[in-house]
Amino acid sequence: MVARKPDINFRQQNIILELLSANGKITLAELAEKTGLNTRVIRYNMDIARAWLRVPGIEFINKPGYGFEVVASQQIKNDLLATLNTMEDCDLVLSSKQRIRLMLLYLLTSIEPVAAKMIAEMENFSRSTIFKDILGVEKWLDGYNIQLLKRSARGLWIECREESRRFALVRLIREELGDTRWHRLFAYFEDHHHFSNDAISHRIAEYIDQLRLDYSHQLIRYIEENINRCMSLKSQVEIMAYLGIMIQAIKQGRSIKGNVDTNTSATDEYAVAQVIGYQIEKEFQIKPSPKEIELLTALIIGSRWEDSPSQEDDRTITIPSSIKSDQIAQQMINICSMRLHPMLKIDEILFQELKNHLDYSLFRLNYHIPIRNSNLEIIKDKFPKIYLVAESSIFLLENEVPTPIPEEEIGFIAMYLLSALERLQTIEDPNLNVIIANDGVRAKSSLLQARLGYEFPNLRVTNTINSSDTTSLSDLIGDLIISTLPLENSNLPVIEVQPFLEIDDIKTIQRWIAENNQTKRRYNMRSLDQQNSLVDLIKLSNITFTPRVSSWWEMVVLASKPLINSLAIQECYLSAMVKLIEDHGFYMYMGSGVLLLHAKPTDGVNQLCMSMLKLQHPFKFDKGTPPDTDIIFVLGATNDNSHLTALFQLNELIQYPDFMTSIRDTKRPSEVVNILWQWIPKLSVSV
């Protein structure tokens, strides 16, 4: 006898709905967010929900630290969702986000203002609930530059560009479906002509079915055949959804008008888009305007492609982008390098990546095509200073496009900057000091040292000890002990190997090096939160005054000397700075007669440090490049992050003529420190 299902209230319906709709596991916190219930209420109602789900073919998982998961076929889940949707009070199950999406659908698809009373009657929402969700609706629309207007006598309506409305609808469908169902949408219309899905709102499912995505699916295949390339799944779904929304909009008289850009109309993709327009006209008896064709062309050009062109057609799709993309990329790097690390100026990979990104970005921004960045919140949360620096350069883009720059775009620029900073650490530290321990047989230690030198040139053997002598193991200085015998009571990590270094020995050492480097990188990223001020780094002993220097080489040596004497940097760091100047010139000139000398963190920095050299008589460079210089700083960064606050402060301070005058008037190092203490609290930059 089959057990009778328990009666469930709207809270329990809500919980079951989210459990069945989840793609895999869902944590208690996620369930609370989606249902709008607190965790205590969910726990209280979970037994009833679990009992309702106790049917053949379902496994219910509930593990501490894992969350909840309903394991069943999609057909079983759909049947249960259909049952839920037929239950009394089922509409009350909708979460705040689902209610907001339904309200957005009404606003984005209605030609006339929408009355809150009408939504309340259609969706069985209370009017107080609708007005409570209005803030969420406004915030969502703001991301697409859509203004929500409301008036008691008229209701709610939106004002925006038609392109913005369409792209907002594409995004709305994606959010309702969820990423997994969204990416399966293109394949769905390989076999289906009508859309149906019981896991989402019936109202939105009906809207999707009206869009004739089956026909849009055919148009995507036509585009691919004529371009002779295969779109990425991401682009297939996005353009398929856009085409369906575009066709419906033109039917309703919401066509896009305007002059067509001649650069875009001259492309092969425009010719393909014209044929697509002809196919639409033949099928639906509506004629897309030339501006509609141009926007469709922009979407095709801005698509991502998976397959390489065939041998018969080896052309590459090029974007008719702004001729200023090179200049903007370099200007952005110049601005950001002054706040992050001067070596970004000579990072060719950063320049190429940023330039290529801007080619697409400028194009999409000019055509109001939204960009999505799933890593935005991570960047803002974990790397706020990098995001702040990227944001400080965004005015360069704002000068070129007719729309505000979205946060997603700033996030992408921050990611490129973060990649460049990480590359400064990609050369593994050559100063890994290894101690060899064996049983006293010199031949073994000699062979082991030779094998280590061959297999691991970055390891430096600093000492050889007898492993039977345990009296000094706790006082050893280095990074690692490699021993031919078991070793205990050591203050350093120990790897036991054969003197011949067998394959397994080599792999063990390789794993240790990889883990050691990864640990350092994680530490470097965590150090982003450190607040090392300029006054923390420029100590009295690191400040030098001298009348003049006879050469730039002497200037570099004098500026570096305090840091070398205090063992903050090694001699090789001085050599690395000289090599950078010889290869790239004085690109590290900051303006106002200030020069910032540096090399990579891996070039011989023992601790975070900075020195300052003040010349009584400015040094004049050959050919006047850079300008005369009398204030020289040397930066020794142990990683890519801990110096950021100090660099932020220095970059802003040198913009103040009064500050520079005060520094130049100083007679003693203590006066420099006092001036820094006076000025740093005045800075407007957030550090």
Image (cartoon, rainbow, N blue to C red):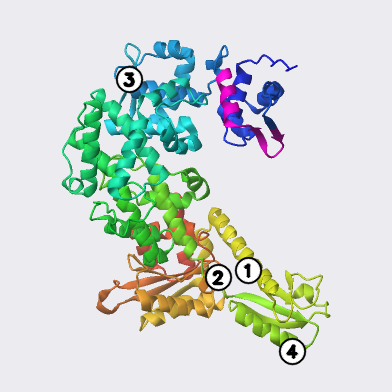
Amino acid type of the residue tagged 4 in the rendering: Ala
Lower position in the chain sequence, tag 2 or tag 4: 2
- The amino acid sitting under disc 3 is Ser
Q: Earlier in the sequence, mark 3 or mark 2?
A: 3
Q: Which residue is mark 3?
A: 110
Nearest to viewer (mark 3 / mark 1): 3
Seen in the image, is 472 located left or right of residue 23?
A: right
**Alpha carbon distance from label 2 to label 4:** 30 Å
Circle 4: is it few (<14), some (14-19), or many (20+) Cα within 10 Å? Answer: few
Q: Amino acid at mark 1?
A: Ile
Judge from the rendering whether residue 611 lies leftward or rightward of residue 142; answer left or right.
Answer: right
Q: Which residue is mark 1?
A: 513
Q: What span is colored magenta in the figure?
A: 61-84
Q: Residues within 10 Å of mark 2 (few under 14, many from 20)?
A: few
**C-beta proximity under 8 Å, tags 1 and 2:** yes
N-terminal of the pair, mark 4 or mark 3, is 3
Gap in angstroms between the C-alphas marked 1 and 2: 9 Å
Q: Viewer-proximal residue, 289 or 622? A: 289
Residue 373, how many percent across, how many down? 43, 44
> From this viewpoint, is residue 356 visible?
yes
Q: Secondary structure at mark 3?
A: loop
Q: Which residue is mark 2?
A: 428
* Image location of residue 606, percent across then percent down: 57, 71
Q: Nearer the viewer, mark 2 or mark 4?
A: 4
The residue positioned 43% from the left and 57% from the top of the image is: 417
What whole-number distance in Å separates the C-alpha atoms at marks 1 and 4? Answer: 26 Å
Q: Tell me if residue 677 is in the magenta stretch.
A: no
Identify the residue under disc 4. 443
Q: Nearer the viewer, residue 24 or 493?
A: 24
Mark number displayed over residue 343: none
**Do labels 4 and 3 touch, CB within 8 Å?**
no
Vertical side of 183 occupied by 345: above or below: below
